[in-house]
Image: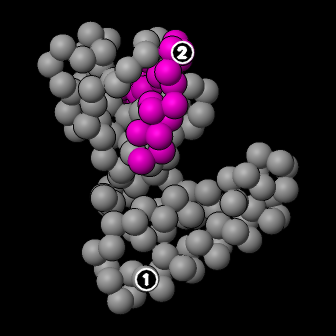
Amino acid sequence: MGDLLAKMDRAGEAGDNYRRALQAAESVLATDGANAPARQLRLSSLVKLGLDEAEVVILGVAPGSQAQQFGVSRGDVILRYAGERVVNADKLASLIASTKGARIELDIRRDGRPLRFIVKEGGLGMQCEDRSTTGQRSP
């Protein structure tokens, strides 16, 4: 809901939703620290509230995949996909699934340099991980 409100330029209401999501995630994590969805919700909420930053880091590339053909490497950071900032690996997966028949842009950062690739229909063939810029990892 926060994302929808943000797109409608209703920043105050969006922030309220992100804060409620953060509280809910922290409540779950207080009793179940290994709860992967709650950890992702917490990180996403922190990022959207501007309290933390997150990255999606490429852990591996499948042989023969589009990612390998581009020259994408382990350790590259995904910045934008189809014009949208990527802040968690789940978001990237949902964006990839929704691009049937489209050619879209993939922006990554490698060693501080931005790079751009054109993605064709189908999967990229990458394994990704969410990582905050503080170096902590989340599922």
The alpha-carbon separation of the residues under discs 2 and 1 comes to 38 Å
Up the image or down, 8 lies above or below 99; here it is below
Q: Is residue 101 magenta?
A: yes
Q: Position of residue 61 (x, y in %)?
A: 21, 27
Q: Tell me the residue that label 2 is attached to.
A: 102
List x then y, in percent, for residue 70: 32, 12
First in sequence: mark 2 or mark 1?
Answer: 1
Splitting the image into 4 quarters, where does residue 135 fall?
A: bottom left
User: What is the secondary structure assignment of the residue under circle 1?
Assistant: helix
Q: Residue at x 38, y 34 (%)?
A: 77
Give x and y (percent) for residue 116.
47, 15
Point out which mark residue 28 bears.
1
Q: Write the start and end of the magenta stretch as one range.
A: 90-115
Q: Residue at x 57, y 80 (%)?
A: 23
Q: Amino acid at mark 2?
A: Ala
User: How dense is the environment of label 1, judged by Cα within 10 Å: few (below 14), some, or many (20 and up)?
Assistant: some
Type of amino acid under label 1: Val
Secondary structure type for disc 2 = loop
Q: How many marks?
A: 2
Relative to 74, 81 lies left or right = right
- Residue at the outermost left position: 63
Q: Report if residue 52 is visible in the image.
A: no
Q: Is residue 48 visible?
A: yes
